[in-house]
Amino acid sequence: MAYESQIFFTLDTTCPWTYIAKKRLDKALAAHAQSPAAAQVRFTIRFLPYQLHPDLPVREQDSPAAEGMLVAACVEAGLSEAEARVLVVEDRGGRGLAEVRRAIAEQRINGVDSVPWILMEGRKRDITLVGAKDVAEYAKVVQTIVRESS
């Protein structure tokens, strides 16, 4: 039976290094998936929110949280425009926002102070990488987790 390793990927959507790290991590995980070691360890990514600059003023029309942008993103993700409008308008400042704020606070308590912050669970130990790393570095951590899982 394969060991299930979770990867906790803490991100701030405003940070370009988050996207770079995600692409590089994806390449390392794709290489692992093609290797014989893929039968030993399965990796799943869980994304966690963070705000680098929570007090940064944002002009509403430029904000990713602007109603029009949120509706468009929901439609692009597969919701109908009517469903998207209900979700965006009814949840404005509601349950979803409270959940995200709670998750961000939890990350701060866990010591996260920059992004990307990637914690990879291992059977013997967890490994944390802070900042965007090269594909080779992510691959090395994946190999370490595989080696230590047997």
Image: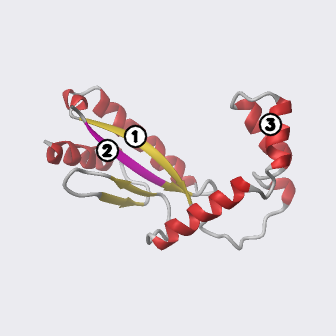
* Mark 1 neighbour density, 10 Å: few (under 14) some (14–19) many (20 or more): some
Dot 3 or dot 2, earlier in sequence: 2
Residue 105, x across and y down, in percent: 57, 69
Residue 59, x across and y down, in percent: 84, 62
Please tell me which residue lies in front, 61 or 82. 82
Position of residue 121 relative to residue 1, above or below, is below
Disc 2 residue type (three-letter): Ser
Disc 3 residue type (three-letter): Ala
Q: In 3D space, how far apart are the residues under numbered discs 1 and 2 (Cα atoms)?
A: 6 Å
Q: Which residue is mark 1?
A: 44
Who's the residue at 71% across and 73% down the image? 55
Q: In 3D space, how far apart are the residues under numbered discs 1 and 3 (Cα atoms)?
A: 28 Å
As helix, strand or loop, the secondary structure at mark 3 comes to helix
Using residue 129 as the reference point, say whether residue 10 is left or right of it. Answer: right
As helix, strand or loop, the secondary structure at mark 2 comes to strand
Q: Which residue is mark 3?
A: 84
Residue 57, x across and y down, in percent: 78, 70
Using residue 104 as the reference point, say whether residue 80 is left or right of it. Answer: right
Q: Which residue is mark 2?
A: 5
Dot 1 or dot 2, earlier in sequence: 2
Please tell me which residue lies in front, 81 or 68. 81
Who's the residue at 28% across and 43% down the image? 139
Position of residue 85 relative to residue 63, above or below, is above
Q: In 3D space, how far apart are the residues under numbered discs 3 and 2 (Cα atoms)?
A: 33 Å
Q: Are marks 1 and 2 in contact (CB under 8 Å)?
A: yes
Looking at this view, name the residue that lies furthest to the front: 95
Position of residue 75 relative to residue 99, above or below, is above
What residue span does the magenta drawing correspond to?
3-9
Using residue 91 as the reference point, say whether residue 145 is left or right of it. Answer: left
Who's the residue at 31% across and 52% down the image? 121
